[in-house]
Amino acid sequence: MRGEITRTWLGSKNIKTLYLKFAAGHVKFWVLILREWALAHFFFRRIAVSDENDRQSLKIRITELAKKTASSLAMEVVLVEIRNEGGRTTLRIYIDQPAGITLEDCERFSRRFSTAMDVEDFVSFAYVLEISSPGVNRPLTREADFKRFLRENARVRTRCPIDGQRNFKGRIVDVTDGRVTFESAPDKQIVIAVADIEKASLIADLSIGRNGMKPQRF
C-alpha cells in the first residue's frame, strides 16, 4: 500500500508540511519544515556546500539540541543527517522510543525542536527539517544499539578495509568492550570495533510469521 497525507501550516517565518507515507507494507513518518528567510538563492547554495569542518561543527550543535529535545519528551535520537538534496539542504532526524514512534510523536518532536532552533538561531540558511521513525532498516550508531539488537541481522560499512573489504552483513552475536562480533556464515565470524564502523543498519526481516503477518519495527 502506498499513500500520502499532507497538512500545511502557514506562519510568519516558515511553511510547515506534514507527511504520512506508506511504502512496502511498512509505515514511516516524516514531518518536513521548510524554513524560508529573505536570503538570495546564491547564498543558500554557497552555504549548502560549505566545507566539511563547518558541516561537522553544525551537525554536533544540532545533534546536541535534538538530544535535549528528545530527552524532554522521553524519546531518543537515533541519527542526525545533513544532506544536500535537489538543490536544498535537508536536516533529517531519526527518533525512537520503547513503544515505537507514531505520527503524533513526530509532530510533537518537530514542534518543540523547531521552536528550540528558532530560539538558538545558529542556522542562518534555508533548510528542510525531516523527522522520521527509524523504520525496519534502523540505523545502528552506538554500542548500545548493537546490544539492543543482539541476534538480529545487520549491514555494516567500515571506515577502512578489513582484509580488503569494507561492506559486511551478518547476525550480531556478541557486543563487548566496544567491539561487535558478526556471524556472516556458519562457523565464520568477524569482530569489528564500533569506532571503526562508518555506517550500520538492521536488515529488515520481512518473512511471514506464524500469524501470517510480516513483522514490523517502527
Image (cartoon, helix red, strand yellow):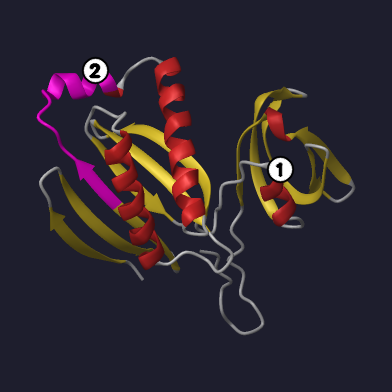
Residue 39, position in %: x, y? 12, 26
Residue closer to the observer: 213 or 38: 38
Q: Element type at marker 2?
A: helix
In the rendered structure, which amino acid carries the disc numbered 1?
Glu
Report x, y in % for residue 215: 58, 71
Residue 65 figure quarter: top left
State how far apart marks 1 and 2 are (Cα).
Answer: 36 Å
- What residue sits 66% from the left and 49% below the top? 145
Query: Callout 2 environment at 10 Å: few (<14), some (14 to 19), or many (20+)?
Result: few
Residue 139 horizontal side relative to residue 168, left or right: left
Which one is earlier in the sequence, the residue at label 1 or at label 2? 2
Which residue is labeled 1 in the image? 143
Residue at image point 62% right, 63% down: 205
Residue 80 seen in this snapshot: yes
Residue pushed farthest right? Answer: 187
Q: Position of residue 153 (x, y in %)?
A: 69, 53
